[in-house]
């Protein structure tokens, strides 16, 4: 996830997949409240997605990436 902290209106996420498929990105506030969702079709191997943050105020968020039963979470800081 870069840039961190996110100073612009977006953040880029790089990720690797073993198999092509649909990947969902969820952003939750520090209180756990759902804020945003983005679904993309990704290929096997290295991928990159840009997530728009222009409606997010400064703070700390949780970025969750899901594909099937797998889930990965990362801290997201917006300036």
Image (cartoon, rainbow, N blue to C red):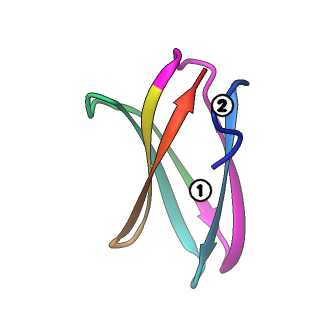
For residue 51, the mark is: none
Q: Which residue is drawn at 52% across and 66% down?
A: 22
For residue 6, the mark is: 2
Question: Which of the 4 quarters of the picture holds residue 55?
Answer: top right
Which of the two labelled residues, at mark 1 and mark 2, occupies the earlier sequence position?
A: 2
Residue 77 lies, in percent from the top left, at 54, 32
- Residue at the bottom extreme, as displayed: 18
Residue 29 lies, in percent from the top left, at 36, 29
- Name the secondary structure under disc 2: loop
Q: Is residue 5 left or right of residue 71?
A: right
Q: In this view, does 75 lie to the left or right of 34?
A: right
Q: Does the magenta stretch include residue 50?
A: yes
Q: Which residue is drawn at 61% across and 20% down?
A: 79
- Name the secondary structure under disc 1: strand
Magenta-tinted stretch: 40-59
Q: Nearer the viewer, residue 48 or 2?
A: 2
Q: Residue at x 57, y 83 (%)?
A: 19
Residue 10 lies, in percent from the top left, at 69, 32
Q: Disc 1 and disc 2: Cα gap in Å?
A: 21 Å
Q: Is the magenta stretch mostly helix, strand or loop?
A: strand
Residue 46 lies, in percent from the top left, at 72, 73
Q: Residue at x 53, y 20 (%)?
A: 56
* Mark 2 neighbour class, 10 Å CA radius: few under 14, some 14 to 19, many 20 or more: some
Q: Is residue 7 left or right of residue 28?
A: right
Q: Does the magenta stretch include residue 6?
A: no
* Mark 1 neighbour class, 10 Å CA radius: few under 14, some 14 to 19, many 20 or more: few
Q: Height in image: 75 above or below 9? A: below
Question: Which of the 4 quarters of the picture holds residue 67?
Answer: bottom left
Q: Height in image: 1 above or below 21? A: above
Q: Nearer the viewer, residue 39 or 51?
A: 51
For residue 40, the mark is: 1
């Amino acid at each position: 996830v870069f840039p961190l902290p996110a100073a612009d209106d977006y953040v880029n996420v790089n990720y690797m997949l073993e198999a092509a498929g649909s990947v969902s990105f969820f952003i939750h506030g520090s209180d756990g409240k759902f804020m945003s969702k983005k679904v993309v079709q990704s290929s096997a191997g290295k991928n990159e997605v840009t997530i728009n943050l222009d409606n997010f105020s400064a703070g700390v968020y949780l970025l969750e990436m899901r594909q099937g039963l797998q889930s990965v979470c990362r801290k997201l800081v917006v300036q």
